Image: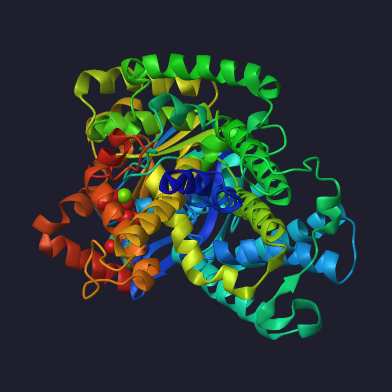
C-alpha cells in the first residue's frame, strides 16, 4: 500500500512538476524546432540561481527576482545562439553541453559570497511562503510543499497551453519546417536564424521556470542539482512521452519519475529484512538507488524497440524516415 | 547581344565560384528578361544549379555582383532574396516530409501575421489570412493534381509529386521571378503539358520564369529566351531556334562523341 501511495505522491511531487517544465522547454527546442540543446541543465541552473541570489543576497521582492532569473536565462540563450545557430546543428550541441558544465562549475567555485560554493544558496522562500493560502497539510503534503506543487503544476498547465497555442499557429508550422529542412524554409523567405533563436529562448525560459520550482521546493539550490545527467534524463522523459506532442513531455516526466519511485520501493521491499526475497549475494538494499536506474533503462530500451515514436508519437511519422 | 533594348529583371556581372581547383561557374555577364520564360540549359555539371544557388543567396561566390529589379542583391541572405520576389526550387526536392501537403503550401505566403511570435497565440488575429491562403493553396493543388493528397504527409509523396508540390509551394510566395531547377523531371507527359500551360499563364500574369531543363522539346515549346552554359560559362544565348542551331551548343552537348571538336574548341579558347 505504501508503494502505491509513494508512487502516486512521486507522480504529483514538486520534482515531477520541475521535470515537466524542463521537458516542455526541451520539447519546444528539440521536439518542434529540432535544435540539439544538450545543456538544458544549464538553463535550469541559471533560472534557479538567478532567482535565489536575487532574493538571498539582494533582497529583491519575489516577482523582481523571478524576472532576474528569467532575464539571465534569456541572456544565456542569446549568448549560446548568436554564434552557433547560423552553423550546422551539431555546433549548438557542443556549445550547450560545454556551457552547462561551465555554468555548474561557475556556481560551485566562484563568487562564493553570492553562490556559497558547493553548499549552494538557501533561505529565499520566505516571501513566497508568506502568501501561502494553505495552513494545514493537504493530502498528506506539508502546507509549504503543497503550495509549491500548486504553483508548479499551474506553471506546467500554463506553459503547455501557451506552447499548444503557438504550435498550432503559422509560427509553429515554421518551427516544424525548420526541423525538417532549413533550406526549404529559407527559400520561402523566412528568417530561419531568428526563428531558431526564438525557440531556443522560449524553451530556455520554460526550463528556467522549472529551475524556479525546484528552488522553491527545496528552499535551496546546489550546483549538484544541475549535473549533466539531468539534461539526459529530461531527454529520456521527452522521448518516452513523444517529442513534438503537447502531452509528450508531461506524460514522460510524470511516468518516468513515478516509475523510478515505484521500482525503488519494490526493490527496497524485496531486499530488506533478515531473509530477503532477492538474496544478498545478488543485491543488497543499499544498491537500490543504482539498480532502479538499470531497470528503468531496460524498460526504456524495450519501449524504443516496440514503440520508437514514444507513447504519444505517431507511427506514420517515424515510418517516413525510412523513405 | 541586344541587352540594351530588353528590360532585364536580373543582371549579373563577373560571377565566379570555384570548388578547390574546379571552376563551377564563371559567368561574365548575364541578363534575364522581365515577363519572359527563360530556359537555362547545358550538359550535366555545367554549373546551372551552382548558379541558382549563388543568385538566390544559398552559396557565396568568389567574385561577382548582381541586381534584381535594379537593387543590388549580391551577398544578401537567402530569405531576403526570396522576400524581394526571387523564389527558387531545388533540383533535389526539399518537401517538408512530416508536414502535410496542405501545410507545406501554407508555409509559402510571406507577411503572415500568424508567423510573428506575439500574434501567433491569438488565432483570431490570423484566422482570416490563413483561410484565404488555404483557399489559394487548394486552387493550386487542384491545378497540380495534388488535391486528393492534401491531408497526406508530404514525405509519402512520390518523386514526381514532390517536384510538383515544391513548384506549387514556390508559387504560393507569389514571387516576381520564379526559378525552377528541373521542375518537370519525373513528371508524366500529360501532366507536364498541362503544367506548361500553367507556366505560360504565369507569364501572362506578369511573372518572370527561369528554369533549368534537359528536355529540348519542352525548352523549344515554352521558352522565349534560352541561355546555354557549359563548363561554368555562358556559351550562347538567344531564341530557342537560334540556340539550337548553334554549332557550339551542339558541340557542348555531343562533346563526348566528338573528341576532335572539343580539343579544337579548347585550343581556340586558350589562345583567345
Ligand atoms: N558543393 C560542391 N563541392 C564541390 N564541387 C561541386 C559542388 N557543387 C557543385 N560542384 C561541382 O560543380 C560543377 C557544377 O555543378 P552543378 O550542380 O552546378 O551542375 P548542373 O549544371 O546543375 O548539372 P546537372 O544538369 O547535372 O544538374 C560540377 O562539376 C560539380 O561537381
Ligand atoms: Mg543541376
Q: Position of residue A163 (x, y in %)?
A: 60, 38
Residue furthest to the left in view is B257
Above or below: residue B180 compared with residue B57: above
Image quarter of residue A291: bottom left
* Residue at 43% in and 24% down: B102
Left/right of residue B4 with respect to residue A122 in the rendered view: left
Taking depth in this image into account, of A60 and B50 the one nearest to the observer is A60
Percent from the top left, x then y, of residue A95? 54, 71
Residue A189 in percent (x, y) is at 57, 41
Check the image and name the residue furthest to the front: A274
**Residue A317 seen in this snapshot:** yes
Could you tell me residue A227's position as x and y percent?
53, 71
Left or right of residue B124: residue B201 = left
Q: Quadrant of ligand 1?
A: bottom left
Quarter of the picture containing the C terminus of chain A is: top left
Give me the residue at 66% from left, 45% from top: A149
Residue name at image x 37 percent, y 51 percent: B49
Q: Is residue B13 left or right of residue A115?
A: left
Up/down of A297 relative to B121, above or below: below
Q: Indicate the colouring scheme.
A: rainbow
Count of numbered tags: 0
Which image quarter holds the N terminus of chain A?
top left
Identify whether B55 is placed above or below B216: below
Can residue B43 be seen at all in this image of the molecule?
A: no
* Front one among A148 and B185: A148
Please give the name of the residue rendered at 80% of the width and 69% of the height, measured from the top-left corner: A53
> Residue B89 versus residue A99: which sits nearer the camera?
A99
Amino acid at each position: 500500500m505504501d508503494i502505491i501511495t509513494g508512487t502516486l505522491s512521486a507522480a504529483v511531487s514538486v520534482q515531477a512538476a520541475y521535470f515537466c517544465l524542463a521537458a516542455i522547454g526541451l520539447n519546444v527546442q528539440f521536439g518542434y524546432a529540432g535544435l540539439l540543446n544538450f545543456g538544458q541543465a544549464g538553463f535550469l541552473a541559471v533560472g534557479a540561481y538567478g532567482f535565489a541570489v536575487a532574493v538571498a543576497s539582494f533582497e529583491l521582492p519575489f516577482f523582481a527576482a523571478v524576472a532576474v532569473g528569467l532575464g539571465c536565462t534569456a541572456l544565456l540563450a542569446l549568448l549560446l545562439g548568436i554564434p552557433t545557430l547560423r552553423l550546422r546543428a551539431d555546433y549548438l550541441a557542443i556549445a550547450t553541453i560545454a556551457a552547462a558544465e561551465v555554468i555548474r562549475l561557475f556556481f560551485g567555485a566562484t563568487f562564493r559570497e553570492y553562490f556559497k560554493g558547493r553548499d549552494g544558496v538557501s533561505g529565499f522562500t520566505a516571501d513566497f511562503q508568506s502568501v501561502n493560502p494553505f495552513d494545514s497539510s493537504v493530502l498528506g503534503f506539508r502546507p509549504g510543499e503543497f503550495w509549491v506543487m500548486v504553483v508548479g503544476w499551474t506553471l506546467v498547465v500554463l506553459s503547455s497551453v501557451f506552447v499548444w497555442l503557438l504550435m498550432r499557429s503559422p509560427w509553429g508550422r515554421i518551427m516544424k519546417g525548420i526541423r525538417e529542412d532549413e533550406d526549404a524554409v529559407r527559400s520561402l523567405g523566412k528568417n530561419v536564424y531568428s526563428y531558431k533563436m526564438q525557440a531556443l529562448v522560449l524553451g530556455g525560459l520554460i526550463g528556467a521556470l522549472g529551475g524556479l520550482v525546484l528552488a522553491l521546493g527545496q528552499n535551496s539550490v546546489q550546483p549538484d542539482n544541475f549535473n549533466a545527467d539531468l539534461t539526459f534524463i529530461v531527454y529520456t522523459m521527452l522521448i518516452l512521452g513523444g517529442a513534438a506532442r503537447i502531452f509528450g513531455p508531461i506524460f514522460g516526466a510524470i511516468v518516468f519519475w513515478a516509475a523510478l519511485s515505484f521500482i525503488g520501493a519494490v526493490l527496497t521491499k524485496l531486499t530488506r529484512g533478515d531473509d530477503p526475497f532477492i538474496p544478498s549475494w545478488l543485491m543488497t538494499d543499499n544498491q537500490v538507488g543504482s539498480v532502479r536506474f538499470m531497470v528503468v533503462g531496460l524498460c526504456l530500451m524495450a519501449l524504443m524497440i516496440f514503440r520508437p515514436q514514444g507513447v504519444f508519437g505517431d507511427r506514420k511519422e517515424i515510418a517516413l524516415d525510412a523513405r | 547581344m541586344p541587352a540594351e533594348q530588353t528590360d532585364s529583371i536580373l543582371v549579373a556581372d563577373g560571377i565566379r565560384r570555384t570548388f578547390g581547383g574546379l571552376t563551377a561557374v564563371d559567368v561574365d555577364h548575364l541578363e534575364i528578361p522581365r515577363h519572359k520564360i527563360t530556359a537555362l540549359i547545358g550538359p550535366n555539371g555545367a554549373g546551372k544549379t551552382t548558379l541558382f544557388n549563388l543568385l538566390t543567396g544559398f552559396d557565396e561566390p568568389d567574385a561577382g555582383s548582381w541586381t534584381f529589379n535594379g537593387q543590388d542583391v549580391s551577398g544578401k541572405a537567402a530569405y531576403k532574396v526570396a522576400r524581394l520576389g526571387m523564389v527558387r526550387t531545388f533540383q533535389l526536392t526539399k518537401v517538408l516530409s512530416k508536414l502535410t501537403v496542405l501545410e507545406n503550401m501554407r508555409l509559402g505566403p510571406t507577411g503572415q501575421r500568424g508567423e510573428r511570435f506575439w500574434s501567433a497565440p491569438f488565432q483570431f488575429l490570423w484566422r482570416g489570412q490563413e483561410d484565404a491562403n488555404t483557399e489559394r493553396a487548394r486552387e493550386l493543388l487542384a491545378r497540380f493534381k495534388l488535391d486528393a493528397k492534401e491531408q497526406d504527409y508530404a514525405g509519402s509523396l512520390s518523386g514526381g509529386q514532390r517536384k510538383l508540390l515544391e513548384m506549387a509551394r514556390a508559387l504560393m510566395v507569389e514571387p516576381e521571378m520564379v526559378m525552377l531547377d528541373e521542375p518537370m523531371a519525373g513528371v508524366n507527359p500529360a501532366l507536364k503539358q498541362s503544367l506548361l500551360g500553367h507556366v505560360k499563364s504565369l507569364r501572362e500574369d506578369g511573372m518572370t520564369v527561369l528554369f533549368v531543363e534537359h528536355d529540348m522539346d519542352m525548352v523549344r515549346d515554352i521558352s522565349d529566351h534560352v541561355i546555354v552554359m557549359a563548363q561554368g560559362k555562358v556559351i550562347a544565348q538567344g531564341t530557342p531556334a537560334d540556340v539550337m542551331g548553334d554549332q557550339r551548343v551542339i558541340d557542348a552537348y555531343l562533346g563526348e562523341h566528338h573528341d576532335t571538336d572539343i580539343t579544337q574548341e579548347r585550343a581556340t579558347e586558350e589562345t583567345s
